[in-house]
Every structure is written in C-alpha cells, then in structure tokens.
Amino acid sequence: MRVLLKLSGEFLAGASSKGFDESILNQITDEIIEIHQAGVELAIVIGGGNLFRGIGSKSVGIDQPTGDNIGMLATIQNALMLSGVIRNKGYKSRVFSIIQMPYVCESYNPSLAKLALGKGNICFFAGGVGNPYFTTDTAGVLRAIETECQVLLKGTNVAGVYNKDPREFADAKLYKCLSYGQALQENLRIMDATAFALAQENQKKIVVFDITQKGNLRKAVLEQSIGTVVTD
C-alpha cells in the first residue's frame, strides 16, 4: 500500500505556532516510522506555515509571487527537518524538491520518487508545485496522482469533515463518508478548490483526520477507523 500524507507546517510548531516543537517532531516521526514498519510506502507533503505565511508578506509590500516563493522554500526546510530526524532514528528517508537545489536535496521526478518509495525510503516531496498561486494541498494531490498513491491523507486539527465548524457550533455533524459531489454541493471546504477538483477528476481517495492526537495516523492508515473518507 502506498499513501501520501499531507501535513500543515503549523502542526510542527505546536502551541507556539512558529518554528519547531521538539515533542511534535518526535511524535510525528515516531508515528511515520510505525506506519513504515508496517510495510506501507509513505510519501509526505508538508506546508511551510510554521516558518512563513505569504499572507503576512503583503504588509511589507511583497507581492504574492515573491511571498509564495518564500513559502515554497519554507516547505523544503520542513521536509529537511523531518527527514533528518527520521534518518537520525535509523530509517531511510529522502527529500525531493520540485525547485532544483542539488546541494540541498534531490530534484523531484515521479519515476525516481516511485523507485525510492519501492526501495523502502520515507519520501518527502517539497517545494509545493514549483509555481506561485498554488497551495500545498494542490501539491499533495498532484504528487499523490503522479506517484500512484492509493489514498491521500490530510492531517488536520479536527476529527474530520463536518457540516459546519465544530469549534463554533456544538451541534456540528461529523461525516464518516462523503462523495465529491456532496462535498461540492454542501460547500464543504475539505481543501482548496483547485486541489479538490484535481482529486475528483482523478478519483483520488481522500481521508481527512485529526493528526494532533497521538496514534491517529496508525488508525487512519492501518485500521481505517477514524476521520472522513471522500471518494467518488
């Protein structure tokens, strides 16, 4: 089984919302390694919001393309950090970037990435899609399609997809299963429109789950007992 895990950069920062939280780094890498030990081929796309958020660049006069480029570089830093921790724990990990940085990490190529996954490497796909105006959600869906992952896991800070914000409404309903059509009809913001349209067009299964709780990654991948499943 081959899966792609999409993480937000903010998750790595913990309660501080900026930088890296050592306990979070150890928690998530231990969980990633557990999935790997179970025989799952695991690819990871991570955002850069713990280091830089493009929305903040406008206040100092930076245009969106420049801000997005800075954000893409932040995703490479995050991938290098997690990959380094995994290697330090004795497991093989490689970082591929769509932005060519040969002295820092490998250049992304779908065929090479699939080969690396098949050889037991935990692989990080960094640099977003390599162009401004696209989110790391879109990068996650695109890489999942290119590397033929069976499922895209989207780690969030809530239990799954609700009919309304559970942090504001006590009666919010959690969906266990959704179709793409229902998600669109009810305007459920699972990910940005470009990413979701790409997933729908390519019939890429999505599982949305709470990544902040220890053990949930195992439950989402191996037990398939939590979160919301979005399929055709």
Image: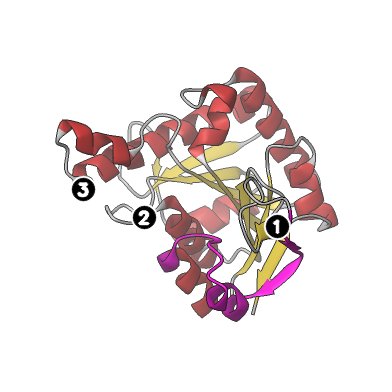
Question: Which mark is nearer the camera, 3 or 1?
Answer: 1
Residue at mark 2? 129
Viewer-closest of 85 and 229: 229
Mark 3: which amino acid?
A: Pro
Label 2 element class: loop
Q: Where is the N terminus found, in terms of image quarters?
A: bottom right
Label 1 element class: loop
Binning the other alpha carbons within 10 Å of mark 2 as few (below 14), some (14 to 19) or many (20 upward) gives: many
Residue at mark 3? 65
Considering only vertical position in the picture, is 202 above or below 47? below
Tell me what residue is drawn at x 80 percent, y 39 percent: 215
Mark 1: which amino acid?
A: Ala
Q: Position of residue 203 (x, y in %)?
A: 58, 77
Q: Where is residue 169 in the image (x, y as percent from the top left)?
A: 66, 51
Q: Residue 201 carries which label?
A: none
Binning the other alpha carbons within 10 Å of mark 1 as few (below 14), some (14 to 19) or many (20 upward) gives: some
C-alpha gap between disc 3 and disc 1: 37 Å
Q: Tell me which segment is drawn in magenta.
A: 171-194
Q: Which of marks 1 and 2 is nearer the N terminus?
A: 2
Question: Which mark is nearer the camera, 2 or 3?
Answer: 3
Viewer-closest of 230 and 56: 56
Q: Residue 172 carries which label?
A: 1
Using the rendered image of the protein, determine whether residue 105 is visible from the camera's viewpoint. no
Considering only vertical position in the picture, is 44 above or below 196? above
